[in-house]
Image (spheres, coloured by chain):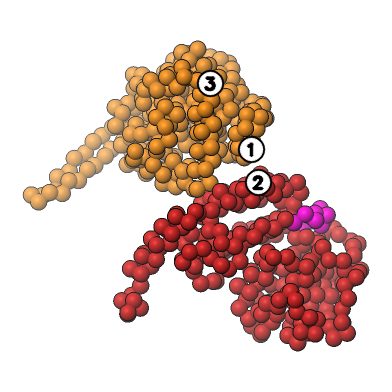
Chain colours: A red, B orange
Amino acid sequence: MDRHPIYLVTGPCGSGKTTWIHQQLITSTEPSAYICLGADATPIDLTYLTATCPHVKPISAGASWTQLAEIQPLYVEVAPQLDLASLQLPVSIESCQRIAIVPKGLIESEYHDWATQTLISEVTEKNATLTASPRWGLTGEVLDPASLNVFWDELIQGAYGSVARAKGIFEIVDGRSFYFSFGIGYPDLTYFELPLPPGLTGRPTRFSGLEVVGDKLQAQVIMETLQDCGLDDNALAYYQDQIRSQLSTELPAEVLI
Amino acid sequence: MKIAVMSCIHGNYEALNAVLSDIDRQKADRIFCLGDLVGYGPHPNAVVEMIRSMDIPTVQGCWDEDIVEGLNACECSYPSILAEKRGKAAHEWTNDQIQPEVREYLAQLPLSLREENLCFVHGSPHNQHEYLMPEINAFTALERVMATGADVLFCGHTHIPYVRTLDAGQLAVKVQQPEGTSTKQFTAPLKQIINAGSVGEPRHGRPNATYVIYDTDDKLTTLREVEYDYQLTCQAIIDKGLPAIFAWRLAQGLEYAERAEDPTHVCER
């Protein structure tokens, strides 16, 4: 595919927009920029992309179109809740590539009409009708890994409602940050560690959170279960102290000096 | 003689009824129960009453012990914070529901039973909380059976039924002392560990109850899997105010709580 300086990417919930953008970004090391139009205060995709592709510059939601056009290549993810028909593009970026990522089986849609290029993802058409995608901000929460595994298995197996897509960034007690991903039709990617510096001093201030696309989701129960997976202040302080002590004894002498 | 061995009923009265009916159809001569009559499930009193009324020889399980003595096991009982919160919620509910005579019955249960060359325990001969997993190393497995003096050790607790035959029944122990090394060898006849699975809280991926039939004459074991209307138990879990996730996990054939990370860990109270 020819490279365009600006890509507007849209599609239904869980169709694979961020996955496609990540595939483009990871094949290049040139400075790039990313913004999600319509994103709320749970920037899971932004955190995931900037952590795994350090050459990507995050753009703040308040940036003007003129500012956006200055950084290229630029990937603009358009959240499905935005009305594409009323999306006003300035002249400066009208020549951008409009890409729709649509589930297989979806023949006609507003995404097809809007896009200059339509890409078919592996997710099923049924998922395209799902619009509920509650999000939970978890910044400051540190989770017990064993509990997180249980919660995640229950979540994707339908204990809290039918789940078509789920992704989250979670902080665990040893200071690492993990990206969890699940989607019907997606490869069997379960989770991996984000290349971020470990946080072992109190509660982390960097973003963590969860987004789920599904049907009949029990949002309150999901939140309560996540809270049940978290460490209280005393436990967190105890474990962080243990891990710091362990790390200091493992470091070579010249490093300790 | 045909004996039926069941374990880990966990207050699931519907499952117990189905298993007892199946045992009847199998024409078992005797029934033994390996404990954990209560905990997590919605009918702890009814389950105990049924076991008592049938005069089924029963050993004390870890949950039975916790209800009698209070929740003071070490952290091994809970492999995660989430499991701990759920387990404590279940314990609190069960503790509130249990009737005095049921508690008294659970308190007087023995830790093991012996019937000729057969031994019956909940977890292991050493502790109700110890898991004898099917993949446990042969030395440990053989030691656990030999510690009882029996040839066949029946256990539960893991909630997954299995039969493990220990046909290399020889232990060699080397003792190193300043004056030299001495070696002692023990030879044992064929030994077996038979896990009865779980009646009320299976963990084999289906909600069906499991137990075993053992024929003492031909030494044959039959693992039985019994279908029952588990949705009745799921509904009772919700109706009685137990955590709804227990109903979902039961329907999936998952345990209410996960097993400890270290299956050979022995609880230190």
Front one among B83 and B5: B83
Left or right: residue B37 versus residue A96 is: left
For the residues bearing labels 1 and 2, Cβ distance under 8 angstroms: yes
Q: Which residue is mark 3?
A: B45
- The residue at the far front in this view is A233
Q: Give coordinates of residue A104: x percent, y percent.
A: 82, 60
Same chain for mark 3 and mark 2? The answer is no
> What number is the disc on residue B244?
1
Front one among A68 and B142: A68
Secondary structure under the numbered disc 3 in the rendered image: helix
Front one among B182 and A4: A4
- Please report the residue visible at 77 percent of the width from the left and 54 percent of the height from the top: A132
Same chain for mark 1 and mark 2? The answer is no
Q: Give coordinates of residue B143: x percent, y percent.
A: 30, 36
Q: Quadrant of the N terminus of chain A?
A: bottom right
Magenta stretch in the rendered image: A122-133
Q: Give coordinates of residue A120: x percent, y percent.
A: 80, 65
Kind of residue at badge 3: Asn
Q: Chain of mark 2?
A: A
Q: CA distance from mark 3 to mark 2?
A: 29 Å
Q: Which residue is mark 2?
A: A221
Secondary structure under the numbered disc 2 in the rendered image: helix
For the residues bearing labels 3 and 1, Cβ distance under 8 angstroms: no
The answer to which of marks 3 and 1 sits earlier in the sequence is 3
Picture layout, residue A68 above or below residue A223: below
| Image quadrant assignment for residue A58 | bottom right
Q: Chain of mark 1?
A: B
| Image quadrant assignment for residue A13 | bottom right
Kind of residue at badge 2: Val
Q: CA distance from mark 3 to mark 1?
A: 20 Å
